[in-house]
Image (cartoon, helix red, strand yellow):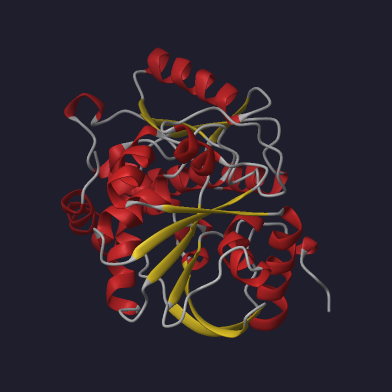
Amino acid sequence: MTTREDVLAARRRVGGRVRRTPVSRVVLPTPGGDLPVALKLEQLQLGGSFKIRGSLNAILNRDAAHRDSPVVIASGGNAGIAAATASGMLGIGCTVVVPASAPAVKVERLRALGAEVVLDGERYTDAYVRATAIAAQRGAQQLHAYDLPDVVAGAGVIGLELAEEAPEATTVLVAVGGGGLVAGIAAALAGDKQVVGVEPSGAPTLHAALAAGSPVDVVVDSIASDALGATRLGDIAMDVARRAAIGSVLVEDEAIVEARNLLWRNFRLAVEHAAAAPVAALLSGAYTPVEGERIVAVICGANTDPTTLPTD
């Protein structure tokens, strides 16, 4: 279980070591007309995504047995970049196990940060098995990309910031992969705002879990799978989803691409496909606000190849 108290402790622990990212208020063209939306710009965070918040919290709160040990994590990219960034800040060694499907731009970033990169398997689940073995062999602290209490609580600090930066918002739209971000934010807000998870139709971990009543394996096939590529919702996310009544919306890859392109063309925000998912829900009409509803969308990361952005 992850609670608001855990999130508050994470904010005290991490303190000024990470950036307090800004909120930008924009107007988006939606099927129902122009819609004012607040964007929480986590792509400006250290390491290029929200993930540094959780990794740093977990390392700072490590138990005595791992006080001087290195860190190991399985990651398709962003969680590994965050772990490597946090480890570098604290002078700790870091090994990141990535699947073969990991984007080259993220692997190159990992190596530039000084992490040991191990390629193993086709999917995140394969990399996780290898990371677990390495952690056992080396006595290392093993981080999880999304299903570790301290990681979820660290991500949840975004929710505390949103309550202060966008108090008018009634609904928070959050991209979902394994569910750590949406769970942390929902735990932090403790029912003060509605939290809705947005995920590709080709990677519906939250949607499938809510339908089944518990996490289930899903087939992942999406343009955003490098960041939203978990094949199963995390147990922590499922627990919070039940307690906080987190909603779920699916979007198509075409809508994600359109949203990513619009964020660049209209606002010069260079983001990865996963980060555009909440905006895609609004542009496509997959999520239609009711009268009086005020929306904030979390833009979760920017670790992308800039050559794939529109040129016009």
Whether residue 10 is visible, yes or no, is: yes
Q: Nearer the viewer, residue 87 or 126?
A: 126
Q: Nearer the viewer, residue 93 or 98?
A: 98
Whether residue 90 is visible, yes or no, is: no
The N terminus is located in which quarter?
top left
The residue sitting at 37% across, 45% down in the picture is 55
Image check: 55 left or right of 164?
right
The residue sitting at 79% across, 61% down in the picture is 308
Q: Quadrant of residue 99?
A: top right
Where in the figure is residue 285, as x and y percent of width and height? 64, 68
Q: Quadrant of residue 34?
A: bottom right
Q: Reply above or below: 311 against 256.
A: below
The residue sitting at 41% across, 51% down in the picture is 181
Q: Reply above or below: 222 against 7.
A: above
The C terminus is located in which quarter?
bottom right
Where in the figure is residue 15, as x and y percent of width and height? 24, 61
The residue sitting at 72% across, 48% down in the picture is 223
Q: Reply above or below: 19 against 14.
A: below
